[in-house]
Image: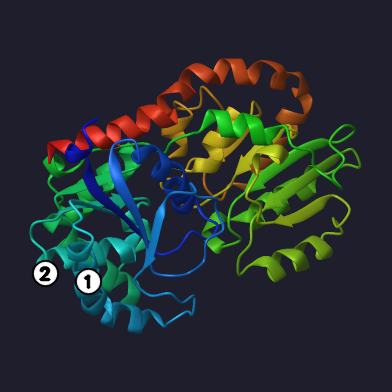
Amino acid sequence: MDKKSIKNLSILITSLGGGGAERVVSIIAEGLQLYYNVTLVLMDDTIIYDLPKNIKVTYLNKSNSKSSKFIKVLSLPYFGWKYSKLCKKLEIDFSLSFMYRPNFINVIGKFFNTKIKCVISERNTASLTYTDKNIEGIIGRFLIHWLYPKSDLIIPNSNGNSTDLIENFSINPDKIEVIHNPLNFEKIYEQSKKPVKGVNFKSKFTFISVGRLFPHKNHEITIRAYSKIATSNTQLLILGTGNQKRHLESLIKELDLENNIKLIGFTKNPYKYLSKSDCYILSSSREGFPNSLLEALSCGISVISSDCKSGPREILQDGKLGDLYDVGDQIGLEKLLLKRIKNIEEKKSTRERNMERLKEFELNRIVRRYNKVLRQI
């Protein structure tokens, strides 16, 4: 590609701490460098995921201090103005943002810099993230209604999230292009071969769940369901950190399952755990397009997922590639856990069966899709 034709692209996100959107950014940033001069713009100096060595990183606010939600809302115009100044300085042509606060700042920045192409990525089911039951939800819904239509393009990561924006926020469908989350198969395969210390996979049927320890991830129902079918030759691993850690530790102790359940914490390489496990569990009450479910499929293990509003049913093709149960249905989940233990041999054929589906999420294909839709606006 002629260097003179290469455009400048900024990617705005809060941080690269452990999370699905953050992992996606760390993956696609490298791929987008084939088409753009990429600058990663962070609002927090937390970087956990690996980045390409030559990626440019700059900060709007180099601090990981946690402001109140009220202050965060009031500061949006300031950071929008500050971001617009940074984009002018860097001669940015396209600004791509991930997650709600960066999305709001990205659109506000366009008010000060009208030449920039403003693209926002919707990672969640907005109507479930922001309800009208509290002031935070009311403000969030107002900002989506007001700001999202002023962007040049909205990229939801699932058809469910796209439908939600159209039906609940009156977004023009012509302004929406769905692009799914990418999978870097080469990296997943390489990292999946790494050894895991301190976990016995050989003689125990292993259930595994990956996700932040937050209420909407609903790890509690997984633990309670597992407690009903737990035996000495089974175990449950939960990878992630969050504000429910102490609560979950107490629950595990209360159920006398300290020898069966391990809270592993955050790891940059969940693949080495996934590939050696037997069954993945996703129990969220809401999702956008869960990376962990895709990653579990790519590691060749069977999956069980809650049928939350957006993501799992779409990924699993209405249950063809894994079992779905109703959100919050503990008894339904228990039955599926027992089913998986009885069908232990299924793991051998799971990866082959799923690979044709997973080709749709291959990194280079997704990056080309981003480049195509950006060039069309």
- Of the two numbered discs 1 and 2 on the same chain, state the one appearing first in sequence: 1
Percent x, y for residue 11?
32, 54
Which amino acid type is marked by label 1? Gly
Q: Can residue 287 be seen in this view?
A: no
Q: Identify the residue at horizontal 17%, vertical 64% (top origin).
A: 88
Q: Residues within 10 Å of mark 1 (few under 14, many from 20)?
A: many
Dividing the picture into quarters, in which one does residue 156 lie? top left
Distance from the alpha carbon under mark 1 to that under mark 2 = 8 Å
Give the amino acid type for the residue marked by disc 2 in the picture: Phe
Residue for point 43% across, 29% down: 361
- Above or below for 67 versus 289: below
Q: Do the residues labelled 1 and 2 touch (CB within 8 Å)?
A: yes
In the rendered image of this protein, does residue 145 appear above or below residue 162? below
Residue at 43% over, 36% down: 182
Looking at the image, which is closer to me, 121 or 261?
Answer: 121
Image quadrant in which the N terminus is located:
top left
Q: The residue tagged with tag 2: helix, strand or loop?
A: helix
Residue designated by label 2: 112
What sort of colour scheme is used for the picture?
rainbow
Place of residue 24 in the rendered image (x, y in percent of width and height, measured from the top left): 44, 46
Q: Residue furthest front?
A: 3
Q: Name the residue under label 1.
A: 80
On the image, the x and y values in percent for residue 224 come to 72, 53
